[in-house]
Amino acid sequence: MSVSISEVARRARVSISTVSRVVNGSSVVNPLTKARVEQAIAELGYQPNAFARGLTLRRSEIIGLVLPDLHGEFYSEIIRGANSQARDLGYELLISSMRDGDRGPVLDSSQRYLALLDGVVLMFAEADDNARDLLSRVALPFVLLDDDMPGVPHDSVIIDQQAGARKLAEHLVDTRGVQRLIFVGGPATNLDTREREAACREVMRRSGRRLDDGDIHYLNYEFETAYAFARRSLSGWVGPGACVFAANDEMAAGIVTAALEAGVTIPGDLGIVGFDDTRIAAMMRPALTTARVPMAEMGSRAVELLCRRLAKPDSPPTQIKLEPTLVIRDSCRVPRR
Amino acid sequence: MSVSISEVARRARVSISTVSRVVNGSSVVNPLTKARVEQAIAELGYQPNAFARGLTLRRSEIIGLVLPDLHGEFYSEIIRGANSQARDLGYELLISSMRDGDRGPVLDSSQRYLALLDGVVLMFAEADDNARDLLSRVALPFVLLDDDMPGVPHDSVIIDQQAGARKLAEHLVDTRGVQRLIFVGGPATNLDTREREAACREVMRRSGRRLDDGDIHYLNYEFETAYAFARRSLSGWVGPGACVFAANDEMAAGIVTAALEAGVTIPGDLGIVGFDDTRIAAMMRPALTTARVPMAEMGSRAVELLCRRLAKPDSPPTQIKLEPTLVIRDSCRVPRR
DNA sequence: GTGAAAGCGCTAACAT
DNA sequence: ATGTTAGCGCTTTCAC
């Protein structure tokens, strides 16, 4: 078994307090004593027991990031931002996924690891009752990411979906003078999709056009689904001033693929925009015009908020709203005539 | 602060031992007593202190998965497999990234969270001295993923890179009768790249051809780099029976993009294969022939190995070798003539 | 079926 | 500058 503080103390012929002091640099120890202790530590390969430490200190300086699932670049960017911020603030970051294969989201308060953390950044796939319920049982400080949960006071970092979608739609109106917008969303229950849709509606309306209900389609954010859907529907879309607004880049890629295979040129015959600015957007041809969601920043700001709360538990709840930026590439350039 | 076992005991008018027994279901308690305790627990919202528990039990039933970085589908698939297996075996899985922005790999034994885990699955970007050094200081059971580390006894799960590359190269020889193979690898220091290269060499040699040194190129696994490189070099490649072997799918995508832009048809003028079978392989056009690395299985087998070791600490070190499978799509179909 | 008490390894207040 | 000791919350013998 591993060596404890008392063995180090015995070997260095000091008391355990002195060892503790050396380990934590908490108060000044005689340099010679200190050297003796350090040598003993090295010789024994002593490592403090984290459980005992946590029990006494009532904190671990470890925080968690719990995501709905860890698939896709979106999440890895969040993680990158969170990780780096956590280290800067002297915390370690541990990541966990709620999703368990097909068994659906799992997060109950009995989750053992939560009790080892000082706090946690949480992101739910959907802000439903289930989520709210889970939340009420989380017994430690938390920050919500990309989700609003009215009624529960909390810190949060959210994306201004409407602003992002508005920028794209306005770009379409301004540069291509879109007459008809085809909106291809994720699930109808998905809040992001609904917000983006609302922004499209509004921009169209304000510019004297309208977004026809028949041109709103709810898919599932996946390439294959969008590809199959576009194969069937594409022929009805092509026409003067038609553009597709896909609610994420993957679906945009699927639609572009179907279009090119059907001989529909892009951006010539049809303009298209995506959302998120994931890797595929730059890799596909034509490269995709899209809205860049500041993913890494979401992670870092959330961690920042959490750590601030740990330091000052009684500060008022804060909400940070981040705006996507427009990334103009080739998929909806004005066709030369 | 949070409620402790003794408050529950007081409220239920039993001793703390009884509360403990109820919480852990360890031994039989009188149903009436049990009910009383359970009610007290509910009323107080009691949650056992994980540090105290860990201190006493000397285990947390939590394991870790430490990856070089969390970018890309490769890792998320590993995570998915590991997660699901961990839950099946009664463990919780926590994930951590070694990479800290541009600050390079970080993993020192002082990493606080390691001390809270029962064991850890580790994957290094490169099996260098640094890695070996870190490893020697990890004071808990571990399993190595996709890395060999001779000299240190350990369990591991590795990919049979050679077998995968061989399947691809043989496919190229058999169906297209390749005369010239252009190998586009990751960094020259990357072990996977070297193994895949060796397999290509061998297959070419065995079939009476050779892999010219001038046709070996070391890049960095990235789309943009491969794209830029292909733009420059492409013209020298096209010719009867030439094929490109890209060491991952992203680079293959970059090369394909450059080729199509230059008017080189694929698979007509040039055949190409990738490696890994990440999402992009199915999404690009032509869809990419590649070798599917069983990523999720890597994760699940590693966790399985780790948990087995936790149960039987003295079993001999085990190595599991997983073989990639050939996924035939369109990027190197025989051109009709 | 239940309780008393030792002990896990550590920190911090207090004493010297 | 260093040692002594209480106590953190829990599990687990050992009595009864």
Image (spheres, coloured by chain):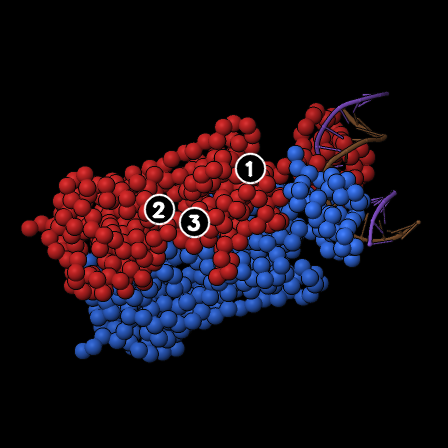
Chain colours: A blue, B red, C brown, D purple
Q: Nearer the viewer, mark 1 or mark 3?
A: 3
Quarter of the figure with residue B235: bottom left
Disc 3 on helix, strand or loop? loop
From the image, tell me which residue sits under label 2: B192
Subunit ID for the residue under disc 3: B
Q: Position of residue B97 (x, y in %)?
A: 50, 52
Q: Position of residue B183 (x, y in %)?
A: 25, 52
Mark 1 closeness class: few <14, some 14–19, many ≥20 residues within 10 Å? some
Q: Position of residue A6 (x, y in %)?
A: 76, 40
Could you tell me how many numbered marks the image carries?
3
Residue B126 image label: 3
Q: Amino acid at mark 1?
A: Pro
From the image, tell me which residue sits under label 1: B141
User: Which residue is found at the position 20% from the left and 51% from the top?
Assistant: B212
Gap in angstroms between the C-alphas marked 1 and 2: 25 Å
Gap in angstroms between the C-alphas marked 2 and 3: 10 Å
In the displayed structure, would residue B99 be above or below residue B116? Answer: below
Residue A248 versus residue A71: which sits nearer the camera?
A: A71
User: Which residue is found at the position 6% from the left and 50% from the top?
Assistant: B337
Q: Amino acid at mark 2?
A: Asp
User: Which residue is found at the position 60% from the left and 50% from the top?
Assistant: B111
Residues at marks 1 and 2 touching, judged by CB atoms closer than 8 Å: no
Gap in angstroms between the C-alphas marked 1 and 3: 20 Å
In the displayed structure, would residue A333 be above or below residue B152? Answer: below
Subunit ID for the residue under disc 1: B
Quarter of the figure with residue B200: top left
Q: First in sequence, mark 1 or 3: give its number.
A: 3
Answer left or right for A24 relative to A223: right
Q: First in sequence, mark 1 or 2: give its number.
A: 1
Q: Amino acid at mark 3?
A: Glu
